Image: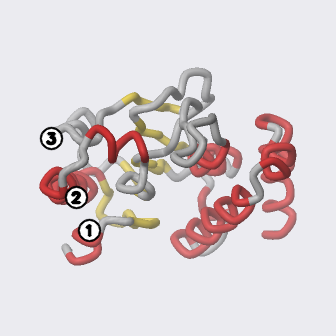
Amino acid sequence: MERALRDRTMDQLNERYELRRKIAREPGLAAILEEFIGRLERAFGSLEGVRGKRILDIASGSNSSRSPDTGKRTALFEPWFARLVLELDGAPVALDAGDLDGEPFEHHRVDLGRSGALDFLPDASFDGVQDSRLFGSPEFRKAYPRKRDHERVKAELARQERRVLKPSGVVIHSDNPLRRSLP
């Protein structure tokens, strides 16, 4: 059953976003999707466990992301995690500084480097939170090049993640070492 759900989900992503064509052009995308699938399976016990879960995707990626190497648009930084959650019948909420217009899930354009940027989200409102790839984002690194900024943002994200997670909620993945060290 899990394999059938996985296959159906990948087929839906292909239909909606031309996934196979994008993987052929940028093979690293397949590994990114496998990583996201693994994170969801570990966090919720199975892909089926995602159904009905409200999941926050911080630094989701966008439709305007560019490769730091070539400067050209890249599928590698599109909002694949939120898309995957949606296809699994979850309720993703994506946050990014880039363009998410036209995406069929709730999304907000947010400057994640600004203190209080997530204050608009209600307390204890998410079953899961993921933050990944923010500190490696070319756009974020350009806007916030100083180590001092990164430390401030890491502390703010850790605080906000604790606040928005339901008591039974899970951190699906975090690139923030401060998040892993705090209760």
* Residue to which mark 3 is pinned: 115
x, y (%) of residue 161? Answer: 28, 56
Residue 152 falls left or right of residue 83:
left
- The quadrant the C terminus occupies is bottom left
Residue 75 in view here: yes
Query: Earlier along the polypeptide chain: callout 3 or callout 2?
Result: 3
Look at discs 1 and 2 and give the one toward the viewer. 2
Secondary structure at numbered mark 2:
helix
Report the Cα–Cα distance between label 1 and label 3: 16 Å
Residue 6, located in which quarter of the rendered image? bottom right
Residue 154's disc is 2
Q: Nearer the viewer, residue 170 or 110?
A: 110
Residue 79 in view here: no
Residue type at the position of mark 3: Ser
Neighbourhood count class around disc 2 (C-alpha, 10 Å): few under 14, some 14–19, many 20 upward = many
Residue 108, located in which quarter of the rendered image? top left
Q: Are marks 3 and 2 in contact (CB under 8 Å)?
A: no
Residue type at the position of mark 2: Lys
